[in-house]
Image: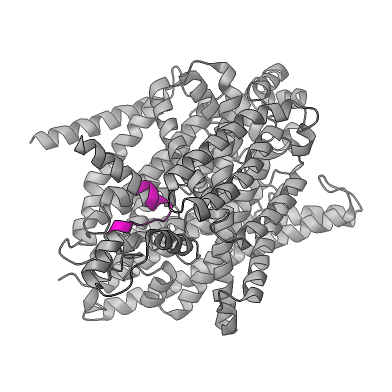
Amino acid sequence: MSLLRNILAKLAETARLMVGQSSYPAYLAHMAACHPDAPVMDEKSFFRERQQARYQGKKGGRCC
Amino acid sequence: MFKSLVWGAIALLGAVALAMVARLHGEAVNALWVVVAAVCVYLIAYRFYATFIADKVLRLDPRRPTPAIAKADGLDFVATDRTVLFGHHFAAIAGAGPLVGPVLAAQMGYLPGMLWILAGVVLAGAVQDFMVLFISMRRDGRSLGELIRTHMGSVPGVIALFGTFLIMVIILAVLALIVVKALTNSPWGTFTIAATIPLALAMGAYSRWLRPGKIGEVSVLGFIGLMLALIYGRNVAESALLAPLFTFSAKQLCYILIGYGFLASVLPVWALLAPRDYLSTFLKIGAILALAIGIVITAPPLRMPQITAFASTGGPVWSGSLFPFLFITIACGAVSGFHALIASGTTPKLIANERDATFIGYGAMLAESMVAIMALVSASVIDPAVYFTMNSPAAVVGTTSASAAHAVSAMGFPVTAGTIDGVAHDVGETTIISRAGGAPTLAVGMAQIFSSLFGNKAMMAFWYHFAILFEALFILTAVDAGTRACRFMIQDLIGLAAPSFRNATGLVPSLSATLLCVAAWGFFLYQGVTDPLGGVNTLWPLFGISNQMLAAIALTLATVFLFQMKRQAYAWVSALPATWLLICTLYAGSLKVGSSDPAVGFLAHASRFQTALADGKLLGPAKSMADMQAIIFNDRVDAGLTLVFMLVVLSILAYGIRACLAARNGEQPMDEALVAS
């Protein structure tokens, strides 16, 4: 059961990264580990920040 | 011992499959042999050649922190699971390119295209992706332009930036042309594509205000909307009242796309671009997987001959002989310079361990190559007569099914007008004649595979429009995102002279740069749409030449890098494919400029029109003397552009050789920080 859940979670993570959304838990973990005192974006702001970053144009984007 | 037995068996199976595909007599070859041969080649290449590059040439170091570790920021630099990252990278590199090129190349038969796809990906394409990914990873995830500046100097850096901009313009024009070719006089297709705009806007509003971040949810809702649009598209096409509203000529579609491209790229990203990106990305991955399953289960026979007479002379789809034109017609799938931009984009910032770079860089390109093989199969399972009816320009086959049947039968592929009308009826279109550009042909092939998978021929029209929708959707997303990317490039380039132009938020710089970009690709799109030879004949070679030249530039960078690392003993790994690409593109470029055959050479074509103009005669499709002038002008622009591409690549080559020589004379590796501990 947990194997199936793992696979599904990985598929969801892959699908999100395909459209430019990196992992929010990974962001939280990074902030907690490296910048415990800095303000942390909530999930909504994180989503919008990533959305904006994907289409800024300088990142290579996608292929033809 | 056991392992070598397994690899021996794979090699044997691959050799048998290749022999089955290449045997010259006997009944039709089954598509499965093509798939098996390709998979065996990929496995062996990955196990042996990719490992060789990883261990001996690049010397990946699993203990060395990647940028995702050293510069972790939780946003751009995040250590990511290798399978997740593989999916991300694959989705970014696989687009319309691997689907269109092989379909166009099928005019020579499936064998030349197949062999080039396999040899190209193993020795050039995957090598380029892997090496650029590695270099960028060793350089904090810097972009291709920055890497060229760092390793070769600031002048080649600017030249490469300029070349990349021109390539973007051509790619956007050729992608838009594919959509125009697919939607001309097709109310069903036009309606479904048009419906994606309000659908995406609604999805944008939903994820902006109602449920931000719920991508899965909003994508499922959007997908349901898409399917409804697809199903009711048939009613629209059959309605006397609605059908005319969605029936457009090629020229009208051209203007609509240009206007759309401008508007879409100035809207905020959350409104239209991001939601449509979800739909097109997931639909693309789903359709590719479905096609793979469909080919394996239905195991269709290939009806296209292995090699047609057009291999040596050029054919109705595009002009010119196999060498060099096959090697620029199939870019994506074999080797694509555009991937160098992606391999130096977001992916290198997300790699958790250097060891993963083989799987992601080399492996994802092998997967894209498989997509190209499947596109080639799809184009080869349909009746070759139908293929040539769909892909020949009106100047060759006329516009009626009687004239097309006559012309295609004369090519050696007997067909009746009734068969042509029958296929058009099956896929729910009024005509299938002269729909070059890849997408419609691929759609017929996919429709045939899917409808035989479900054993229901009545569904063929649905599957055809599904395939058109999936391609047009991600092409429009690419046009939107590409116009934005192109705008930033223009701002960067002008910013070199006038720094205030770089201001990304200023209204005047951003609007004028967007306008400039849309005008640039719109010019080539219009030219392609009005081209008597169907547009693809002009634009696809330009795209192929520019894309392969970018690959040559990326491989030159990789060679310089190997010299600077004091690994010049292995420089052939990148130098050999770079040399091959230089030969193909420079030769093809010089033919496009200087060939005396008006179907191949731009200048010969211009002078044919010039002579007619001097005699006061009109040559089709020109309807007035002004049209004649415009065609001559377009030809000269195309010739000039080809020359510019050749100059760009030659100057990068010169800078590359200079950098290699300088590095060879140096005692120490150029940069200690670059050398693995």
x, y (%) of residue A4? 24, 36
Say left or right for B311 vs B52.
right
For the view shown, which residue lies furthest in the front direction?
B210
Whether B120 is among the magenta residues is no
Magenta stretch bounds: A14-25
Q: Residue at x 83, y 54 (%)?
A: B628
x, y (%) of residue B126? 35, 51
Say left or right for B537 vs B605.
left
> Which of the 4 quarters of the picture holds residue B504?
bottom right
Q: Residue at x 78, y 38 (%)?
A: B245
State the residue in front, B211 or B541: B211
Say whether residue B474 is visible. Answer: yes
Say left or right for B339 vs B517.
left
Whether A22 is among the magenta residues is yes
**Quarter that holds the C terminus of chain B:** bottom left
Residue B434 vertical position relative to residue B554 in the rendered view, above or below:
above
Q: Residue at x 55, y 25 (%)?
A: B382
x, y (%) of residue B100? 54, 42
**Quarter that holds the N terminus of chain B:** top left
x, y (%) of residue B344? 38, 63
Say whether residue B316 is visible. Answer: no
For the view shown, which residue lies furthest in the right direction?
B616
- What's the coloring here? one colour
State the residue in front, A5 or B266: A5
> Which of the 4 quarters of the picture holds residue B2?
top left
